[in-house]
Image: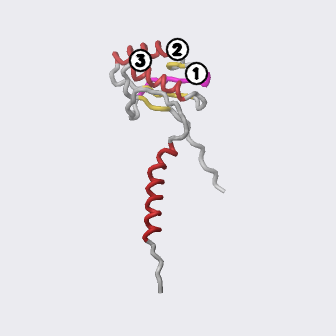
């Protein structure tokens, strides 16, 4: 009685497995995205903080006063001199482009403030049947 030799089948399967393992990471990188660059910032515990708001049209405010990024950076540097432990909370509309958010984050970082958090809305509670 003759038996089927499975060695060639195993060889082919190992070659295919190797090819798939090599090409899989490239499939994830096929979507072209231009990512903005900024300096990393540290996390923050619950402390009093300055609130920076970015509106949908891209306008930036410190507290309730609308300001540009250069003025924001200068004001934050002034606050940092008086209070070295100052923190910033970033409050942005969901429709604000990612690039604009990183510009604001970079301005905060250039001002020397390492404590930056995001203000988000709570997710709606699930309805019970």
The C terminus lies in quadrant: bottom right
The span picked out in magenta is: 48-58
User: Is residue 76 shown above or below 116?
Assistant: above
Q: Residues within 10 Å of mark 1 (few under 14, many from 20)?
A: some
The disc placed on residue 103 is none
Q: Quadrant of residue 77?
A: top left
**Which residue is label 3 attached to?**
76
**Which residue is label 1 attached to?**
58
Residue 5 percent coordinates (x, y): 45, 75
Residue 42 percent coordinates (x, y): 37, 32
Which circle, 3 or 1, is nearer the viewer?
A: 1
Which circle, 2 or 1, is nearer the viewer?
A: 1
Q: Residue at x 61, y 50 (%)?
A: 126
Q: Residue at x 39, y 20 (%)?
A: 110
Task: Tell me the distance, in whole angstroms, between the alpha carbons under discs 3 and 2.
Answer: 12 Å
Q: Is residue 53 magenta?
A: yes
**Residue at the right extreme?**
129
Residue 99 percent coordinates (x, y): 52, 26
Q: Is residue 63 magenta?
A: no
**Mark 3, secondary structure of its residue:** helix
Q: Residues within 10 Å of mark 3 (few under 14, many from 20)?
A: many
**Which residue is label 2 attached to?**
67
**Mark 2, secondary structure of its residue:** strand
Q: Earlier in the sequence, mark 3 or mark 1?
A: 1
Task: Tell me the distance, in whole angstroms, between the alpha carbons under discs 2 and 1.
Answer: 11 Å
Q: Quadrant of residue 54?
A: top right
Total numbered badges shown on the rendered structure: 3
Q: Earlier in the sequence, mark 2 or mark 1?
A: 1
User: Is residue 54 shown above or below 44?
Assistant: above
Relative side of 128 to 86, left or right: right
């Amino acid at each position: 009685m003759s038996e089927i030799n499975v060695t060639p089948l195993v060889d082919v399967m190992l070659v295919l497995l190797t090819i798939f393992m090599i090409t899989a990471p490239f499939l994830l990188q096929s979507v072209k995205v231009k990512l903005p660059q900024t300096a990393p910032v540290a996390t923050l515990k619950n402390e009093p903080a300055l609130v920076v708001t970015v509106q949908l049209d891209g306008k930036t405010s410190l507290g309730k006063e609308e300001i540009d990024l250069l003025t924001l950076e200068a004001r934050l540097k002034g606050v940092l001199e008086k209070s070295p432990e100052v923190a910033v909370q970033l409050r942005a509309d969901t429709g604000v482009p990612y690039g604009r958010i990183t510009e604001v984050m970079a301005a905060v970082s250039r001002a020397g403030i390492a404590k930056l958090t995001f203000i988000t809305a709570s997710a709606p509670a699930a309805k019970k049947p």
